[in-house]
Image (spheres, rainbow, N blue to C red):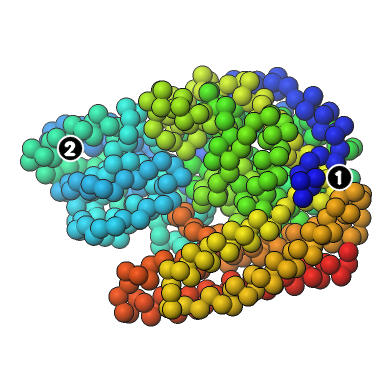
């Protein structure tokens, strides 16, 4: 399998890497320092027009879509306690208060820490807290799960104390993209504010001294807004219908240089070099710039997944998200977002292009990963990051972007957060991985790595369930799938040397896409094809994850959970069985 991860066209790869230049991307980064790219704003339109104009000048085909996105844009916020007014920010999709604000008794919630960005989607309280009619005060960032949790417990409002001297913008809805009939009721119904740590300590001292009531003032602009969505395409010459989607968001908090002007500039440079080498491209490259990432919960990428869902399902061989590359002090590739079947390919691409090591992690439910329900193999989100030793030296706490610089989601995310040398190094990673995806005869996916993960996941859930659930059908179907995969990958060495488009190689690749459509969906989704998951943590094989809750369940919930697991085992086993059939059908053509 190692040979499948390496380039089959070393000359083209060398030409692409040699063509990389900081001129185009750095000019764009500098231009974006003057644009506060709030979704639906004039500055955002200016930014999109700038990209479109550069694409036109470079001769790259592109389309500007103008979908209506459901946005919530923070305008102002403050917190009053014991006569003291504190500076505050309200996250997107908090509610607007009346002019007089919302007043209530504040209750300090200890032990409930809402962590950094990716942990916004992982909030598992272990104790019951009476917050009915109260305004909760919580350490950390105010992401969707804690807001949803406290709202459902009857809280009147929420105050989150950020860990440093800055206040970070964010978003607190669990709805992914535009609401539909399945999820519109999940929109937050309470006001939420964030304050910094020094003010938080002062607030806590006042509360301990008997200042019981606080008042929240929040104002947001909410509704449906027409926003840009720009998609460029470089057509391949052998299998032009097959494409890789590489994408990132244009909208920002303030000027957002590390998040995500550097990513937007990276996309432009990739479009340039691949267009200039288009005559040698076997498959097509789509490059997309999104709106509504921060104030629409991935609004434009979700719209694109909806509007072009069938084409994506039929023809997208991979999606690659680009967010916060090339930032200050970001010299390591650790905890890089990557799906299991593409982990070794990502590691090889990074090693070959930079000489650096790599560690991957399961994609969180974040970062414009709006394509899991279609079942598309995916790699990257955040890429390079500063070493942990550097973060410790700087006294930084964990954040979810900007290469781990704590300027993330603040007014401090300015030009100094970008690093030209790091940006050029990261561009080499993207260009290398894309060249191999687009031009290697075989797609570089090893689904045996994923099925090994599935075996570990089943073992963990089965041990937790004990005699309460029968995982036998899932184990049997997984074993059969592994046998089929062994036969498929035995053909890889022979097929890898053939030309792109060879019928047998095409059958092999078709099987890999079919596997992704089944196995990515079963590993990352509950809602089914062409639906959206909520912005909360999605565990491995989520239909079976409730097995972990059986030990603490009462008799009624044990029976409910057993029923759920019976259905979940059926869904998982059927996906494994369907996948094995896909492989065996392909083997008949190879």
- Residue at screen point 55% across, 46% down: 361
The CA span between labels 1 and 2 is 61 Å
Seen in the image, is 238 located left or right of residue 98?
right
Report the residue marked by disc 2.
Answer: 204
Q: Is residue 132 above or below residue 484?
A: above
Residue lying at 8% horizontally and 37% vertically, measured from the top left: 209
Q: Secondary structure at mark 2?
A: helix
Considering depth in this image, is 312 or 342 the residue closer to the camera? 342
- Report which residue position mark 1 lands on: 282
Tell me: 469 left or right of 336.
left
**Neighbour tally class for label 2: few under 14, some 14-19, many 20 plus, Cα within 10 Å:** some
**Which element carries disc 1, helix, strand or loop?**
loop
Quadrant that contains the C terminus: bottom right
- Residue 476 visible in image: yes
Front-most of 109 and 126?
Answer: 126
Residue 562 in picture, x, y percent from top left: 43, 78
Residue at horizontal 57%, vertical 30%?
Answer: 332
């Amino acid at each position: 399998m190692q040979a499948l991860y390496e380039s089959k066209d070393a000359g083209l790869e060398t030409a692409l890497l040699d063509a990389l230049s900081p001129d185009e991307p750095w000019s764009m980064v500098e231009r974006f320092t003057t644009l506060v790219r709030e979704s639906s704003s004039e500055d955002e339109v200016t930014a999109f027009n700038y990209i479109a104009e550069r694409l036109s000048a470079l001769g790259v085909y592109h389309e500007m879509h103008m979908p209506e996105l459901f946005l919530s844009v923070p305008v102002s916020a403050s917190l009053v306690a014991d006569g003291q007014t504190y500076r505050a920010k309200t996250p997107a999709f908090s509610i607007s208060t009346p002019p007089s604000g919302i007043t209530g008794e504040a209750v300090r919630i200890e032990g409930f820490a809402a962590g950094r960005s990716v942990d916004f989607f992982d909030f598992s309280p272990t104790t019951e807290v009476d917050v009915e009619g109260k305004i909760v005060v919580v350490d950390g960032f105010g992401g969707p799960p804690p807001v949803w949790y406290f709202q459902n417990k009857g809280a009147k409002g929420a105050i989150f104390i950020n860990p440093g001297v800055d206040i970070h913008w964010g978003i607190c809805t669990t709805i992914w993209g535009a609401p539909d009939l399945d999820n519109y009721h999940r929109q937050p119904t309470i006001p939420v504010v964030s304050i910094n740590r020094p003010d938080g300590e002062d607030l806590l001292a006042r509360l301990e001294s008997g200042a019981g009531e606080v008042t929240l003032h929040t104002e947001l602009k909410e509704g449906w807004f027409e926003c840009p969505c720009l998609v460029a395409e470089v057509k391949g010459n052998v299998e032009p219908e097959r494409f890789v989607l590489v994408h990132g968001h244009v909208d920002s908090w303030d000027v957002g240089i590390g998040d995500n002007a550097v990513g937007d500039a990276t996309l432009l440079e990739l479009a340039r070099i691949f267009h200039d080498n288009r005559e040698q491209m076997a498959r097509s490259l789509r490059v997309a710039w999104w709106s509504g990432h921060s104030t629409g919960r991935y609004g434009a990428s979700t719209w694109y997944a909806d509007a072009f869902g069938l084409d994506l399902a039929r023809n997208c061989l991979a999606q690659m998200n680009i967010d916060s590359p090339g930032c200050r002090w970001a010299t390591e590739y650790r905890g890089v977002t990557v799906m299991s079947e593409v982990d070794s390919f990502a590691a090889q691409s990074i090693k070959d292009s930079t000489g650096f090591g790599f560690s991957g992690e399961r994609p969180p439910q974040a970062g414009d990963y709006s394509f899991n329900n279609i079942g598309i193999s995916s790699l990257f989100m955040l890429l390079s990051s500063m070493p942990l030793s550097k973060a410790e030296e700087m006294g930084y706490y964990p954040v979810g972007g900007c290469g781990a610089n704590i300027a993330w989601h603040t007014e401090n995310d300015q030009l100094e957060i970008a690093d030209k040398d790091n940006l050029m190094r990261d561009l080499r990673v993207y260009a290398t991985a894309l060249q191999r995806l687009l031009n290697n005869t075989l797609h570089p996916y090893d689904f045996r790595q994923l099925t090994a993960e599935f075996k570990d996941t089943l073992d963990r859930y089965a041990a937790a369930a004990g005699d309460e659930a029968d995982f036998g059908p899932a184990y049997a179907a997984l074993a059969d799938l592994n046998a089929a995969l062994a036969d498929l990958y035995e053909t890889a060495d022979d097929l890898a040397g053939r030309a792109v488009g060879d019928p047998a190689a095409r059958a092999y690749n078709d099987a890999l896409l079919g596997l992704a459509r089944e196995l990515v969906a079963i590993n990352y989704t509950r809602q089914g094809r062409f639906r959206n998951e909520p912005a909360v943590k999605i565990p491995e094989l989520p239909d079976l994850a409730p097995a972990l809750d059986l030990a603490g369940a009462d008799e009624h919930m044990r029976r409910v959970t057993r029923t759920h697991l019976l259905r979940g085992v059926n869904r998982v086993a059927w996906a494994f069985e369907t996948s094995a059939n896909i492989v065996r059908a392909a083997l008949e053509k190879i």
